[in-house]
Amino acid sequence: QVQLVESGGGLVHPGGSLRLSCAASGFIGGPSTIGWFRQVPGKEREGVSCISRSGTIIHYADSVKGRFTISRDNAKTTVYLEMDTLTSDDTGVYYCAAGPLCIETLPGRLFSTWGQGTQVTVSS
């Protein structure tokens, strides 16, 4: 059974940093593209970033470029999202998901396996 488990969320002050982890299990040959998405109540789900299986293709939403960094450790089948210079606009539930492609528009509909989410709250 394929599974994704997020961790690393929490409460942080504006300007602070957090690192989210997405641990994958049950994927034959390892997980393919992994994407990070976030959801705020009352708003549409937003694609944040994605990384291909090899790690050579990476995309970020414009809202996080220059502040967030995605990486993966295939030996540990874990994908990380380093988030720096956080603002209140980054508050939300962050989900990782597995899908076939990492493309610039970060369409959530392509991703078939989702984790349970981890809450990130940026507040003073």
Image (cartoon, helix red, strand yellow):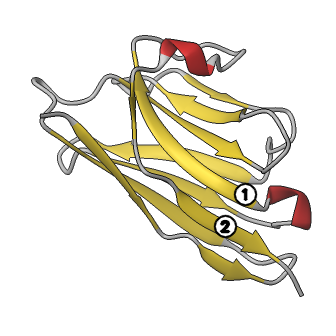
- Answer few, some or many: residues within 10 Å of disc 1's Cα (few below 14, many 20 plus, some between 14 and 19): many
Q: Which quadrant of the view contains residue 32?
A: top left
Mark 1 vs 2, N-terminal side: 1
Left/right of residue 83 with respect to residue 8 in the rendered view: right
Q: Residue at x 64, y 55 (%)?
A: 93
Nearer to me, 18 or 4? 4
Quarter-wise, where is residue 30 in the image?
top left
Local secondary structure at mark 2:
strand
Give the vertical position of 24 relative to 45 (above or below).
below
| Residue position marked by numbered label 1 in the rendering | 92
Percent from the top left, x then y, of residue 83?
Answer: 67, 60
- SS of the residue under disc 1: strand
* Residue in the image at 56% along x and 70% along y: 9
What percent of the width, then of the height, locates residue 77?
23, 44
- Amino acid of disc 2: Val
Residue 123: x percent and y percent? Answer: 85, 80
- Quadrant occupied by the C terminus: bottom right
Where is mark 2, residue-wise?
A: 120
Q: Is residue 70 above or below residue 67?
A: above
Measure the alpha-carbon separation of dots 1 and 2: 5 Å
Amino acid type for the residue under numbered disc 1: Gly
Q: Residue at image x 17%, y 45%?
A: 75
Depicted 29 relative to depicted 75: above or below:
above
Identify the residue at horizontal 84%, vertical 40% (top origin).
43
Pick whichever, 43 or 36, lies toward us.
Answer: 43
Marks 1,2: beta carbons within 8 A: yes
Label ID, residue 21: none
